[in-house]
Amino acid sequence: MMEFSRWKIWMVIIATVFGILYSLPNFLPQTMREAMGRYYLPSQVLNLGLDLQGGSYLLLEVDTDALAREKTANLTEDVRSTLRQKSINFSGLAATSEAVNVRITDAAQFETALTELQRLPQPLPKNPSIRDINVVRGDNQTISLKFTTDGRRADAASAVDTSIEIVRRRVDSLGTKEPTILRQGANRIVVQAPGESDPEQLKRVIGQTAKLTFQMVDETISPADAQAGRVPPGSELLVSENPGEPYLVVKKRVLVSGDNLTSASVGTDQYNRPAIDFRFDGQGARKFGDATAQNIGKRFAIILDGKIVSAPTIQSAITGGSGQITGTFSTQEASELVNVLKGGALPAPLKVEEQKTVGAELGADSVAKGQFSTLIAFISVVIFMILAYGFLFGGISVAALLVNLTLLVAGMSVTQATLTLPGIAGLILTLAMAVDANVLIYERMRDEAAAGRSVIGALDAGFSRAIETILDANITTLGAALIMFAFGAGPVRGFAWTLSLGVITSVFSAVFVTQILLVWWYRTARPKKLPI
Amino acid sequence: MAWPLIKLLPAKTNFRFVAFSKIAAIISVVAVIGSMALTLIPFEGPCGGLNCGVDFKGGTVLEMNLGGKSVDLGKLRGALTGDEGLHDVQVQGVGENNTAAMIRFETPEGGNPAQKVEEIKTHLSGQFEGAQYTRTEVVGPKVSGELLTGGVVALFMAIGLMMVYIWFRFEWQFGLGAAIGLLHDVILTFGLFALFDDLEFTLTAVAAILTIIGYSMNDTVVVFDRLRENLRKYKKLPLGEVIDLSINETLSRTIITGVTAIMALLGLAILGGEALYSFSVALMFGIIIGTYSSIYVAAPVILIWGVNRNDADAEIVDMGGFKGKR
């Protein structure tokens, strides 16, 4: 212990200087921090968790079952229209959870039907050798179109990617400050919005699928008949928001969808009520123009998330590519809807699995309590160590503790690890554990001195023997912290990170700072007796 | 008066710890069985006798205040009963004069709890003027199940990892002793949570237990380290006496570190507010239990199994520390 190279001293000095530099911004006012940032000095402060800062946390799950259901429904319609186009007679078109089955009535048409249906599967975007559907020849002139597992997985993965992108756009449109949007696991999304944000609005805006479609109203059947269960194939019964006609039957074929929108804005209708003006892109305008030209005098339905918003009658062909959605919107609803439509539709509904909202006031209160408890803990540890080991040895451990705290705060600020409420507890426990290293060293020195060694002998033997114990003891704590980090969620991870950093900084400061100060004391004072 | 105070602690103590180990073993076994019973009974739900928070049980917690005025809890209860979309409604006052109220409820399976909580807020705001919601937590049943499994897996992983580490650093008997000691601490801490209903068992409590594992291990390693050293030093001394000697030699460190940790946490328990109360109480309890288990659970296990005293790698102990320079 007594011989150590200069590099150790320099390492401690450099680490301490950097520690002070990087922890300093936490104690400076905002304006000074900004000034420091301009001179390339560190300006990052501790990253407070939502429980300390206030804000909202949402864990959303992409409803992949709904996605699969929708895909099955679409495939069924594709099979129907493909076969009809080629005038192939079929029966028993039905979907199960894994496949769509159809029976070709005329044996002579079977091979043609198979060739036509084999055009439906699409290669996967990331692996073109695999297709999303397998077309299989069944018994008794049946054909079955089975979804492949890889195809399902690719669909789900791309749905999650798209959802994250869309959620980000929507959250940004709310003007939320510094939102965090992350993927978690296979099909979950975490949204964190710090500060005073309205969790209700956030949830409403994120949760809306915003799937907008334009479909023709099926006027061959009255809604009352349809409700009795006589919906013709290729049509469906939908709820309408117009209280005058609560249900309408619409054709399943989509004329144009929200994917073809280029712009949307809040406008007013002829009665001066809020409405939504929209504009289609070239393809959308052409499709919409053709459809309206063919169906003058008939009605079409504007459908948002499975509900009919309005169902106007086509007066003339609409070829300009722009239109207006009228309905019973409030101004706020209209403007939220515009933002959501601009951001695009979610590929599948999102379910809120977990929500945490903490008011900023409660957060500030926790910070104040945490600061105060840390201060009290620090002072009591300092008093206790000085009472127990005197000004010299107690003082040395306090110096090591100060270096440790500085390094810890600096480390937390640099890594931008989230400090949570349990993290503050971890910080306080670190104080005690840091002192433990000093206690181990001092007690070992006392033992060695009691065994009759000289001062330098006791210092030397006490130190080198304690180190082994300190390392063993701290590696186990580090192990527990790493497990917490791997398995824990949210606040526990923050705690684990604080604890891990604390273990590393406390071993560093106890081993090096204590060693240097003890040797320095020995060389200058040349004591005859150990003062503890 | 001795100064510094450390001189009051005798450099050498001669307590006969091992002599009491039979009584301690009986106490430990009774406490462990009692804790297990408290934790598991009644055998229902995911949590048994523990007062699980929404993290593990699923459900909703809502904290409401009226901007400093006291909340009429009876009226609040009345406003919430009769809603068929809620069950297990609990209303609890917070602070002196109930300046805030904590509302807990569950929504039936298949419902949409995230939407329900907004309905409830609107409903309550209509009845209580100026109602503010400082905290909202909604945990769906899927997530809560995963969190519980994750928490339990983490606890077992931690104990297993510690056992393997000690096995490699020491000998297998030490690893086994340490693992049994840790299980003892974990089970007793569960017992503490089950015994006191106002200690809520949440994700943070799991973090507390993991920290206790870390601390208890730390303590055990210090004793084991000295034990290993003394086993090499005093080859003729009976095992029981070597254990006693090692515990005595590390006793002053055990006391000082324990007192420091408890002192630091005491402030947190008193001043840290409700959110950290369970956490710091559990930690303090764990520090005491962890210290006890290092002496009376981990070490006696080694006594039962014995150790190989004539190990080939038992080296000659270096008695001299002075390197002769300077």
Image (cartoon, coloured by chain):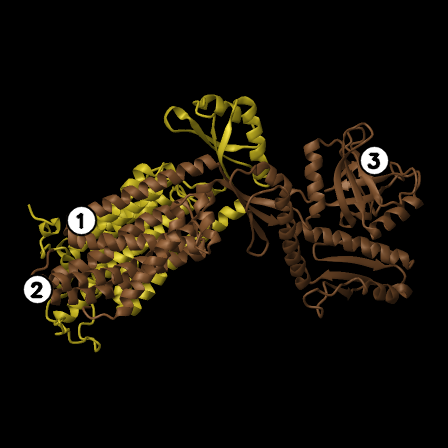
Chain colours: A brown, B yellow
Residue A118 shows in the view? yes
- Residue identifier under label 2: A451
Q: Which mark is residue A386?
A: 1
**Quadrant of the frame with the N terminus of chain A:** bottom left
The percent coordinates of residue B321 (x first, y second) are 14, 70
- Residue identifier under label 3: A223
Of residues A164 and B205, the one nearer the viewer is A164
Residue A108 as seen in the image, left or right of residue B49: right
Task: State which mark lies toward you, 3 or 1.
Answer: 1
Report which quarter residue B47 is drawn in. top left
SS for callout 2: loop
Q: Are marks 3 and 1 on the same chain?
A: yes
Label 1 is placed on what type of residue?
A: Ile
- Which residue is rendered at x = 70% and y = 57% of the image? A98
Task: State which mark lies toward you, 2 or 1.
Answer: 1
The percent coordinates of residue A331 (x first, y second) are 70, 32
- Which residue is rendered at x = 35% and y = 46% of the image? A425
In the rendered image, the vertical position of residue A112 relative to residue A67, given as above or below: below
Residue A498 shows in the view? no
